[in-house]
Amino acid sequence: MDGFEPKIIGFCCNWCAYAGADLAGIGRIQYPPNLRMIRVMCSGTIEPVYVLEAFQKGADGVFIGGCHPGDCHYQAGNYKTMRKVILMKRLLSQLGISPKRLRLEWVSAAEGQRFAQVVTDFIAEVKELGPNPLNQEVAQHG
Amino acid sequence: MDKKIKLAIGLGATCAGCDIAILDLNEKILDLASLADIVFWPTAMDFKLSELEKIEKNEIDISLYHGTVRTSEHEHIVHLLRERSKVIIAFGSCSCFGGIPGLCNLTSKEEIFETAYKETPSTVNPEFITPKTKVSQDGHDLTLPELYNDGRALSQIADVDYYLPGCPPAVELIERLIPIISNFLETGELPPKGTVIASDKTLCDECPLTKENKMVSRIFRPHEIIPDPKRCLLEQGILCMGPATRGGCGSRCINVGMPCRGCMGPTAEVRDQGAKMVSAIASILGAENEKDLSEDDVEKLMDQIKDPVGTFYRFSLPVALVNKRIKEGS
């Protein structure tokens, strides 16, 4: 779609993905500005309801960034995130929302380049998918 | 008692189990009869919609409405009741959250007609005749209510004063209406608006079974396992909605060895029952050896949950954050 700039909500954990994003910033690595990032202490704190609410309010994609498996600052939060995201994707696809709109990536604090890369890829993928189908209703009902 | 309130019981898309639940009050129904004159209850007595239409504004003291709002007629009944009643109570899960008929939101009216009037093997309908709201034949006009595309909870149509959830509501919860009514008769006072006549805690909090390690390694469907009757069903691998469901039902299903299906809806703090359940299940399923599980292993674990939306939103899809199936690219 021409001129479609997706709105992406990103939840990034304080210890890895957010620090990785910081590093991308410090290193002045360029990536598209579609990501609105929210810092959380651990990706494991991201409740499925946050993801649903993001979509319901019109986000075109939801990005979740956490520590690599084994690296969670709280030992095992990211394993729970992985299971939640896999189940959420199934729920979303039953509700008719493409599971590709939800993306989980592991980014360490040292991976600024990787952060920029996965975010760029995700934004391109969501652009391909087009606007969130719920968005039309958001526009109608405010 | 000579003074009585006027009580109406209206219905939408319902199995009438809620009516049976009221009758299940047994001898307590006499207490109800001594407090209330029933002015409308089509399931139990011969009432016509035209009689409800004749009732004056605010003339009914308390109305109970059960069933999902699924057709134009249901919506009409809701508006009639709302206009004529001082208090309206969403009675039962369909009315409170959309209930099982609310799962219609996963399909569309066209698809339902397609299946029911065309695709089923026993249907012969070459012209694909489907229900119309109005048909004229030989100078007669025949009408039917319009089937809506979505099922809705009562609160999505009208202002609701109280909620009494359950599928059907537990008799001990219905009994709580009796002191509310008698207090209203004596003092004119009512509980605060929005009160849910049930417990404020989750079912897990009230559950009589023993929880041991709060971990699940595989999911069993109820027919695949004979559970230990004393131990938490979820820990034994049976999907139980207890962690995300309001209590107050008296653990009826648990007491007979069946898992909670979530009919009491979410607790007051929870916005979306299904999402809460996803969170609960994902946290405990495979938790024991979570560090050894690859993404593929987790996919296989989740494969055991056959119908996530139908299981986690069995009674509450119409009031969920994303409350119907959307179509990508439309």
Image (cartoon, coloured by chain):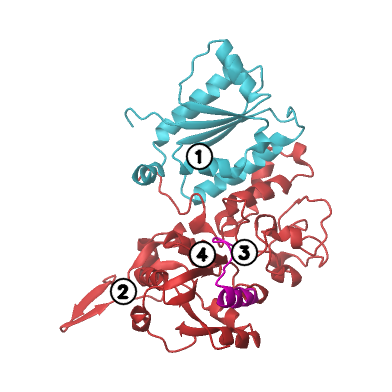
Chain colours: A cyan, B red
Task: Residue under label 1, please give it.
Answer: A54
Left of B194 or right of it: where is B108?
left
Pointers 4 and 3 in contact (C-beta within 8 Å): no
Between circles 1 and 4, the one closer to the viewer is 4
Residue B104 percent coordinates (x, y)? 45, 62
Task: Residue under label 4, please give it.
Answer: B161
Cα–Cα span, label 1 and label 4 = 30 Å
Amino acid type at mark 3 = Met
Q: Label 3 marks which chain's residue?
A: B
Task: Residue under label 2, please give it.
Answer: B125
Residue at 45 percent of width and 53 percent of height: B325
Span of residues in magenta: B175-195
Q: Secondary structure at mark 1?
A: helix
Dots 2 and 3 on the same chain = yes
Q: Secondary structure at mark 3?
A: loop
User: Which residue is nearer to you in this view: B223 or B106?
Assistant: B106
Q: Label 4 marks which chain's residue?
A: B
User: Which residue is nearer to you in this view: B321 or B91?
Assistant: B91
